[in-house]
Image: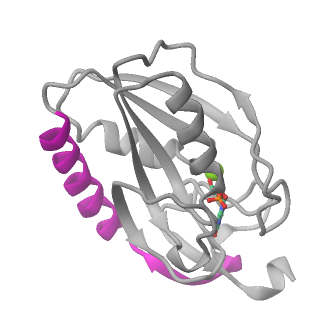
Amino acid sequence: MEKIYNDIEKILVSKEEIKKRVKELGEQITQDLEGEDVIVIGILKGCALFFSDLIREIDLKVDVDFMICSSYANDTKSSGNVKIIKDTNIDVKNKVVLIVEDIIDSGRTMYNLKEIFKVRKCKAFKVCTLLNKQERREADIEADYIGFEVPNEFVVGYGLDYAGKYRNLPEVGVLKPEIYS
Ligand code: IMP
Ligand code: MG
């Protein structure tokens, strides 16, 4: 097996920056959602690292669960089709749903999730994303909590993958172009 860092061109967000920002997000969420019945739902697999760090910074008695949505498979562009592979079975009616996502790109995944939870009559639908690629937005959706804005480049690390790899990179970085071209 080759080492991860051989494939990384540059680091966009360092471990220290992630740690500081995750703490800030947790504090903000704690402040905003105090008194509410909250279900934090992570979208696997990309959310895994962010989710586990974030929920430890939220000082509320939340429920947690995970969902799996179809992704880009081995491509770097969205197919536009969003499928639910694993759903939550928690009843969200009259509760606040806080979705935790690794990145919002076209916004299609999140737009679809919002529609799904609207039908299930949650009290509010909130989105916390580690990264936001505003330039690529196609669907009418904005996150309530954003860790970092990133440029229109394919990023990996801290949960984000390319073809299943690089999720365990502890920071967010950009791959060398020869890796995906
Ligand atoms: P959207 O539906 O286009 O917003 O896509 C969201 C999903 O695409 C994310 O949950 C990621 O899994 C994946 N994705 C989008 N951009 C990137 C990227 O730069 N690196 C890794 N995954 C990405
Ligand atoms: Mg994802």
Which corner quadrant holds the N terminus?
A: bottom right
Is residue 38 positioned above or below 98 on the image? above
Is residue 95 positioned above or below 9 on the image? above
Is residue 119 positioned above or below 52 on the image? above
Q: Does the magenta run of residues contain 12?
A: yes
Which residue does the image show at 63% across and 81% down from the upper left? 153
Where does the image place residue 2, in percent across and percent down from the top left? Answer: 77, 66
Left or right: 6 with respect to 160?
right
Q: Does the magenta run of residues contain 146?
A: no
Task: Identify the image's colour scheme: rainbow, by chain, secondary structure or one colour.
Answer: one colour
Q: Quick one: 168 or 138, which is closer to the camera?
A: 138
Where does the image place residue 92, in percent across and percent down from the top left? Answer: 44, 19
Q: Which residues are magenta?
A: 6-33
Which residue does the image show at 52% across and 30% down from the upper left? 117
Where does the image place residue 109, in percent across and percent down from the top left? Answer: 64, 50
Left or right: 79 with respect to 53?
right
Q: Main secondary structure of the magenta part?
A: helix
Q: Quick one: 41 or 120, which is closer to the camera?
A: 120
Which residue does the image show at 82% across and 86% down from the upper left? 178
The quarter of the displayed image where residue 164 is located: bottom right
Is residue 35 positioned above or below 175 on the image? above
Where does the image place residue 123, in percent across and percent down from the top left? Answer: 34, 27
Q: Quick one: 181 or 105, which is closer to the camera?
A: 105
Which corner quadrant holds the C terminus?
A: bottom right
Which residue does the image show at 20% across and 56% down from the upper left? 24
Count the labels in the image.
Answer: 0
